[in-house]
Each structure stands twice: as C-alpha cells, then as structure tokens.
Amino acid sequence: MAKAAKVSELKAGLSKYLARVKRGEQIVITERGRPVAKLVPLPKRPEGMDAGEWERLLDLERRGILTIPEQSGIPAEFWTMPRGEDPEGLVLKQLLDDRESGW
C-alpha cells in the first residue's frame, strides 16, 4: 500500500520521501485531501540488457504501448542472446495491430 503525503509535507521533507522511494516505496501526493500524483521508483534496467534496448522499452512505456513489470522472471542471459533484425519495425507493428483488433 502506498504512503500518502500532503504537498506541504513533501516540500518540507523531500529528501526523506525520495529516500523512501529509492527503497521501493510508492508515495501518493495529496492536495486538500485529494490524490494528485504518485512518486514511484524508476524501473531498473535488467542485468545484461543493452542500454539502447532499455531506452527503447522506456519509450514504449511512456507512449502507453507496454508496461515494464516491477520484477522480471526472465533470466539475465536472455538479454545477451542474439536478436533477429527488424529494421522496418514489423514485429512491433504486428503487436500493435493485434492489440487494436482485440486478438
């Protein structure tokens, strides 16, 4: 369960709240008793994953195309396996088409 903090509390104790978020906690920010934002830890790049690939996943998440799980069940060696070429982005296009069609 996320801890709630008023805007005034957050302003007065930002370092304390950031330390909590770094430890994995989520903080819901409230203004006049109503939730307005949430501080959450940034996802961590899986060990062995290329930085460029990680940035691509983060971009897809920002665009709402995918959600990066909090924990990965994928072994680290998966990220070092050779990948097929897809310069035209056909795999992503097919995935998006499938989602749109409800398949």
Image (tube, grey):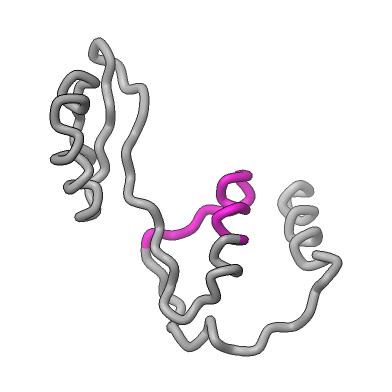
Task: Give the quarter of the image for residue 64.
Answer: top right
Q: Is residue 31 magenta?
A: no
Left or right, 18 with respect to 53, comes to left
Please tell me which residue is depicted at 76% across the width and 56% down the height of the picture: 98
Q: Quadrant of the N terminus?
A: top left
Q: Quadrant of the C terminus?
A: bottom right
Q: Toward which corner of the image does residue 23 lie, by quadrant?
A: bottom left
Single out the residue that lies furthest toward the top: 32
Nearer the observer, 102 or 64: 64
Extreme-right residue of the structure: 88
- Residue 99 in percent (x, y) is at 71, 52
Q: Per the image, is 57 magenta? A: yes
Report the side of 60 relative to 102 (left or right).
left
Numbered circles on residues, count: 0
Residue at 80% across / 65% down in the picture? 89
Query: Up-down: is 16 above or below 47?
Result: above
Q: Residue 15's quadrant in the figure?
A: top left
Magenta stretch bounds = 56-70
Q: Residue at (30%, 16%) from the top-left corner?
A: 34
Please report the residue visible at 44 percent of the width from the left and 60 percent of the height from the top.
69
For residue 52, above or below residue 27: below
Image coords of residue 52 (percent x, y): 59, 68
* Closer to us: 42 or 94: 42
Measured as percent of width and height from the top left, residue 82 is found at 65, 89
Q: Position of residue 25 (x, y in %)?
A: 22, 48
Please say if 40 is above or below 82.
above
102 to 86, vertically: above or below? above
On the picture, is 41 further left or further right than 21?
right
